[in-house]
Image: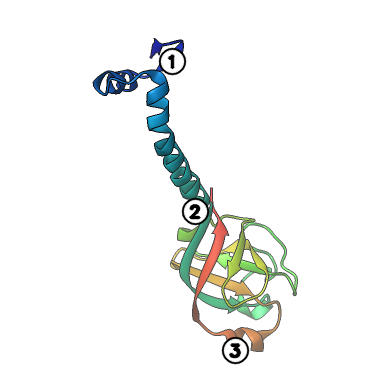
């Protein structure tokens, strides 16, 4: 760091000023539009980094005794599912992408937000399972679909 006219500057800035034979006020005027452009790009990158999207396979599941071993309403993370909850289970590869326990997810084609409450067996990838309470017929009607999901990432 160097000081020029009482202002701390990096060595490259001082060299640029010397090459262009600019004083600090001229250099500031020259850099101002570039700084605004770079700031705008940085803000856009940070904003888009916060919102994540992915296309996944979506199936549906219920909390009935014949469909699982153990307690059908108990998730792998220890949550208790109740009919009417907007919950999903995610494949383990999605957890690594930021879809961990408690994350809110929007599913294109379905109203509202769903919360990650369960995780699936390791054999699945790029897959979500939408909780549909005890409504087996609704789960069967859903079947298997490709959907786009959105969530806020860090």
- State the image coordinates of residue 31 (x, y, percent, origin top left): 39, 31
- Depth check, mark 2 against mark 3: the one in front is 2
- Depth check, mark 1 against mark 3: the one in front is 1
Name which residue lies at 42% across and 40% down: 38
The residue that disc 3 covers is: 141
- State the image coordinates of residue 93 (x, y, percent, origin top left): 45, 59
As helix, strand or loop, the secondary structure at mark 1 comes to strand
Name which residue lies at 36% across and 18% down: 23
- State the image coordinates of residue 20 (x, y, percent, origin top left): 27, 24
Name which residue lies at 71% across and 80% down: 134
The residue that disc 2 covers is: 48
Mark sitting earlier along the chain (2/1):
1
Residue sitting at the far left: 19
As helix, strand or loop, the secondary structure at mark 3 comes to helix
Mark 2 residue crowding within 10 angstroms, few (<14) / some (14–19) / many (20+): few
Mark 3 residue crowding within 10 angstroms, few (<14) / some (14–19) / many (20+): few
Quarter the N terminus occupies: top left
The residue that disc 1 covers is: 8
Q: Determine the CA span between mark 2 and mark 1.
A: 33 Å
Q: On screen, 40 above or below 134?
A: above
């Amino acid at each position: 760091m160097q000081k020029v006219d009482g202002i701390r500057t990096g060595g490259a800035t001082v060299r640029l000023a010397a090459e262009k034979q600019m004083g600090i006020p001229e250099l500031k005027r020259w850099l101002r539009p570039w700084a605004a452009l770079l700031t705008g790009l940085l803000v856009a990158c940070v904003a888009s980094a916060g919102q994540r999207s992915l296309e996944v396979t979506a199936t549906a599941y219920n909390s009935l005794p014949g469909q699982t071993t153990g307690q059908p309403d108990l998730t792998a993370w220890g949550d208790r599912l109740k009919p009417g909850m907007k919950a999903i289970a995610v494949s383990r590869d999605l957890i690594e992408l930021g879809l961990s326990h408690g994350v809110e997810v929007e599913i294109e084609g379905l109203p509202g937000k769903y919360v990650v409450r369960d995780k699936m067996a390791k054999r699945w990838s790029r897959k979500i399972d939408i909780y549909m309470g005890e409504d087996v017929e609704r789960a069967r009607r859903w079947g298997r679909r490709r959907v786009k999901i959105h969530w806020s990432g860090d």
